[in-house]
Amino acid sequence: MFTRHAIKQLSAYCNGELSAEQSQRVREHLLACARCRKQHDEIKLGVQLAEQLPMVSAPAEMWSEIERLLEQRSRKPMLQPRAPNPFSTFNLYRVAVYAAVLVVAVALAIAVRLYSSYRPTPSGPSWDVASLSGTIRVGGQRISNKGRLAVGETLETDSTSQAKISVGAIGEVLLDSNSRIRLLQARVTEHRLALDRGRLRAKISAPPKLFFVDTPSAQAIDLGCAYTLEVDDLGRSFLHVTAGWVELVRDNRQSYVPMGAMCQTRPGIGPGTPYFEDASSSFVRALEAFDFESGGEKAFQEVLNEARARDTFTLWHLLSRVEGDQRSRVLDKMIELVGLPRHVTRDGVMHLDQKMLATWKDELDSVWF
């Protein structure tokens, strides 16, 4: 086992470049280290995307032009002439150019792949949809097998039907019975749905902030993950993240919800404070009362009393949602449970120093996820 982390070995591990013994050591470490698992998942996603890219060759005239420009530059007088050497400035520039061209080629290949997943309809871009059971309605039309959901159209399921939506080339959404969604945007840079009611299960493999779901009380921003999102008849939403992270946003209020955590939202208020699914029922109830029901001091004190070390992530969110004495008490509880990280001071946290808050959040990430 690694005594600290295996981050430096993860790229070679994902590409199959380690020996059998080294690979086994990395596998064992990943089972115990959430921080390295998170890094591994991100690297693995990049490897999978790269494997799907077509080979792209640059036109011959491009290289001729690049070499001509570089040769002109290499003729400029130097302040201190040096003896020729095989690793000259020209060669370094050439390596840089090759790298830049490769990046452009990869970006173009990904763009082509994403664009190819959107087949236009008379009303614009659209996504594939399929009925998993029963009959669904797309744009008012009944569909019992497969169809397309265009931007601006609505997909509805009844009590006997379920549907699957292909989110471009980055993932899929399963829509449960008695649900309604709308496709708001289908672009390479933005994939956006609105969940009006019901429940969806999303599984996305893409860079952060490409997939969005609007609800009546908040916006769910995917950070590369899998989650369940439900909206009830009152417009309240309930988020449960099963992989990765989701950010919930409404106006200036935001909540970061990690794997194994949940968060509720309310119309007119926005996101509540996230909590882990294994938190005590009294902790969750007190948090709901404080967030949404004007629970006041009684609910606030119950949250502090019931908090475990793992619940410091919930308390971290509360730091910026309370003031004065309450903020001081939240901070005292966090210090009691996990202590202050290096380079984080009590005074800085009390003044909501963003750098210090981010440092503490990263520290919590490395411990609990």
Image (spheres, grey):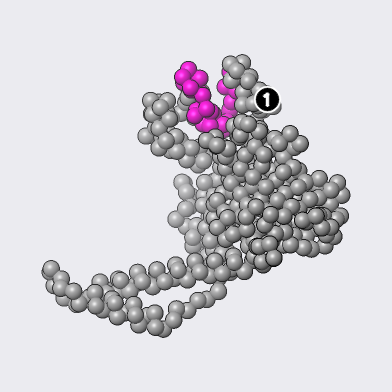
Residue 361, position in %: x, y?
48, 37
Closer to us: 85 or 112: 112
Highlighted magenta segment, given as a residue range: 301-330
Closer to us: 224 or 254: 254
Which residue is disc 1 drawn over?
Answer: 285
State which quadrant residue 253 falls in.
top right
Above or below 68: residue 114: above
Give the residue drawn at x 26%, y 79%: 71
Closer to us: 228 or 366: 228
Q: Is residue 325 magenta?
A: yes
Residue 153, position in %: x, y?
72, 55
Residue 219, position in %: x, y?
61, 42
Q: Amino acid at mark 1?
A: Arg
Above or below 169: residue 355: above
State which quadrant residue 230 falls in.
top right
Label 1 crowd bin: few (<14), some (14–19), many (20+), radius 10 Å = some
Give the residue drawn at x 44%, y 67%: 103
Q: Is residue 31 visible?
A: no
Residue 40, position in %: x, y?
54, 54
Give the residue drawn at x 29%, y 77%: 69
Q: Classify mark 1: helix, strand or loop.
A: helix
Q: Is residue 218 visible?
A: yes
Which residue sits furthest left?
80
Main SS of residues in magenta:
helix
